[in-house]
Amino acid sequence: MALFSVKMRSSALGAHISGAERIVEEHEVGTVCAAMSRRALSHGKGQPDSITITVAAIHGDVMRIPALSITEAGSRALDEAREVVLRTLDPLTPHAERAWELLTSVRDMRGAILFDASTGERLERDHARGVRVTSMDAATATGERPEQGSGKTRITDALVLASKVAHHPAVLAEVCISDDPDYTTGYVATQSLGYLRVRNMKPAGSPIGGRLFVVDTNDTADLVHYLEHTPVLVGGAQ
Ligand code: WAQ
Ligand code: MG
């Protein structure tokens, strides 16, 4: 059966607004493209003046990996959220505070910061754009997935991305803050800890948001190729 990767990105005056990733069967391509454009047009960050949807046939195998398990940190305020993140990163890098400072100072990136665990340096080539994880989806049949825009998709989408990212051995941890001004729950994820939801990652109404991957690798190109191109289905029967 032919599978297709469907990607959407939207922007206004050149600034990134939103993006989405799916892997679907041929007969679902039309419906998914329509749902993605609807979702892009009603995004909380603003009205896009450009929406690009790319459909590409997947040649070769699709990797199947389990979803990370979801847990929740009971953080009641920003400083508690920061503590949860720092406590998770501290054993993995001596530059945990720098990682937090960096992540909480960026916005409007299409992709993620690649943060070198040992040096605290950024490894991605384009600092304004970051590295965008694409070609992934939940393994569940389309009919069983939550309706696009229902609110449930946000956590599903994040869990799929986090599971793909954590699966690569060079990734030690991921930290995510939503760029939606009214969505203040983020997460920190590692392969062993799973997906830890963290409330109050930023003040309500703040436009900041981004992703940061703490990595340990001497082959950044291999990692970036996996993140950008390897098709991965998450969850379901392995
Ligand atoms: N690859 C890399 N970075 C990305 C990608 C991607 N495919 N998609 C988004 N980002 C970066 C980009 O800088 C965004 O500004 C930032 O992440 C946040 O993206 O369990 O909604 O789509 O309730 O706003 C977490 C859910 C929600 C927590 C995260 O992220 C929970 C969210 P958003
Ligand atoms: Mg967003």
Image (spheres, rainbow, N blue to C red):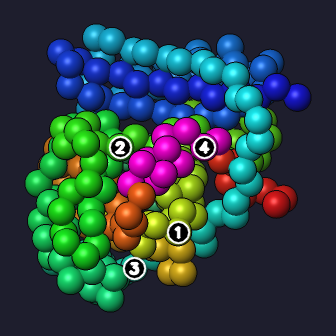
CA separation in Å, label 3 and label 2: 27 Å
Rendered image: mark on residue 131: 2
Work out which residue is located at the far front of the displayed protein and give it. Answer: 218
Inspect the magenta stretch and tell me whether residue 112 lies in it: no
Residue under circle 1?
169
N-terminal of the pair, mark 1 or mark 4, is 1
For the record, the magenta segment spans 220-231
User: Is label 3 in contact with label 2 (beta carbons under 8 Å)?
Assistant: no
CA separation in Å, label 1 and label 4: 14 Å
Residue 70 relative to residue 102: left or right: right
N-terminal of the pair, mark 3 or mark 4, is 3
Residue 207 relative to residue 139: left or right: left
N-terminal of the pair, mark 3 or mark 1, is 3
Q: Quadrant of residue 204?
A: bottom left
Rendered image: mark on residue 73: 3
Inspect the magenta stretch and tell me whether residue 228 lies in it: yes
Q: Residues within 10 Å of mark 2 (few under 14, many from 20)?
A: many
CA separation in Å, label 1 and label 2: 17 Å
Q: Secondary structure at mark 1?
A: loop
Q: Disc 3 vs disc 1: which is toward the camera?
A: 1
Q: Where the N terminus falls, by quadrant?
A: top right
Whole-percent x, y for residue 167 in the image: 57, 64
Give the residue at x 27% y 48%.
Answer: 124
Residue 187 relative to residue 60: left or right: left
N-terminal of the pair, mark 3 or mark 2, is 3
The amino acid type found where label 2 is placed reads: Val
Give the residue at x 35% y 43%.
Answer: 131
